[in-house]
Amino acid sequence: MTISLKNESGYPLKRENLSIKRIIMSQIKKSRTFEHLDSLLPYEDLNYAKGYTKRHYKTPEGKDYPSVTNVLSILSEDSIRKWRKRVGEEEANRISGKASIRGTAVHAIIEDYINNKEDYRKEYTPFIIGSFLDVKPILDSRIGKVYAQEAALYSNHLEMAGRVDCVAEFDGKLSIIDFKTSAKTKKKEWITNYFIQESAYSIMWEERTGMPITQLVTIISVDNEEPQVFIEHRDNWTDKLWSTIDEYRRRKLFAG
């Protein structure tokens, strides 16, 4: 069921919206308790590497690797540049900032909910709470044992690092799970970069733990629409992953 109590605000509630918030909050119940397994990663976290204009991580071995999003950004550079030119820098910054605030907040409430935190109901706007409620039935009915959330991963094979949203069983199969938000329904061909990113995380996870994951799951909360779930196989996206890595390295070589 899609919750329609949403608005365009990504900011703190005004006083007149508090009653709406109370109504929405009363709908949020801790429907289930998620089972978490002990971490299989031999480290707690990765630190950011210093001295870079874009995000890099330092591995336990002391190597500096670019983030997955950093590497994959070359896939959308041209389209983003054209979009910013079309709408103007000020409007582009407004839209991007709003989307970032919303995405971060929805990620946070999903993470707290799956982590079984009783206080996951924080001071969120009806807009954010509605986005969470849209995907909550999917979380409750399709996610099984949880292996990791917001886990830092890296690969010496790929020479990349990043932070995966969730590693858990989905429909009974161990999966890389990514949570997204969107103002409109997505077509598969528009979000291939999501699948490429998830394929990188699956390779990193297997390299770090010895446990292979081939199922990639993207869950998207869409404004005033039913949420979307895309399920892909890792091996359909590894060739594109490698070609993107090769292009990133080529550009870095020529830029240097």
Image (cartoon, rainbow, N blue to C red):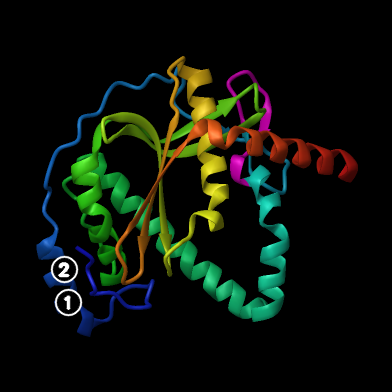
Tell me where residue 14 sits by quadrant. bottom left
Q: Please tell me whether residue 231 is drawn above or below residue 22 in the rendered image.
A: above
In this figure, which residue is indicated by the disc labeled 1? 20
- Magenta span covers which residues? 58-69
Look at the image and tell me whether residue 66 can be seen.
no
Which element carries disc 2, helix, strand or loop?
helix
Viewed as shown, does residue 87 lie left or right of 130?
A: right
Task: Locate the N terminus and report the quarter of the image it occupies.
Answer: bottom left
* Residue 65 shows up from this direction: yes
Amino acid at dot 1: Ile
Between residue 183 and residue 149, name the one nearer to us. 183
At a point 68% along the width and 47% down the height, the residue shown is: 54
Q: Which quadrant, please, contains the C terminus?
A: top right
Query: Front-most of 177 and 243?
Result: 243
The residue where tag 2 is placed is: 24
Q: Residues within 10 Å of mark 1 (few under 14, many from 20)?
A: few
Indicate whether residue 78 is drawn in magenta.
Answer: no
Query: Looking at the image, which is closer to me, 56 or 146?
Result: 146
* Residue at the outermost bottom position: 16
Disc 1 from disc 2: Cα separation:
6 Å
Instruction: Determine whether 65 is above or below 89 in the image.
Output: above
Contact (Cβ within 8 Å) of mark 1 with mark 2? yes
Q: Is residue 223 above or below residue 76?
A: below
Q: Is residue 175 left or right of residue 141?
A: right
Query: At which x and y percent is residue 66?
Result: 66, 37
Estimate the x, y position of residue 180 in percent, counting from the top left.
42, 54
Q: Residues within 10 Å of mark 2 (few under 14, many from 20)?
A: some
Place of residue 185 in the rendered image (x, y in percent of width and height, measured from the top left): 42, 65
Q: Which mark is residue 226?
A: none
Task: Tell me the amino acid under the disc marked 2.
Answer: Ile
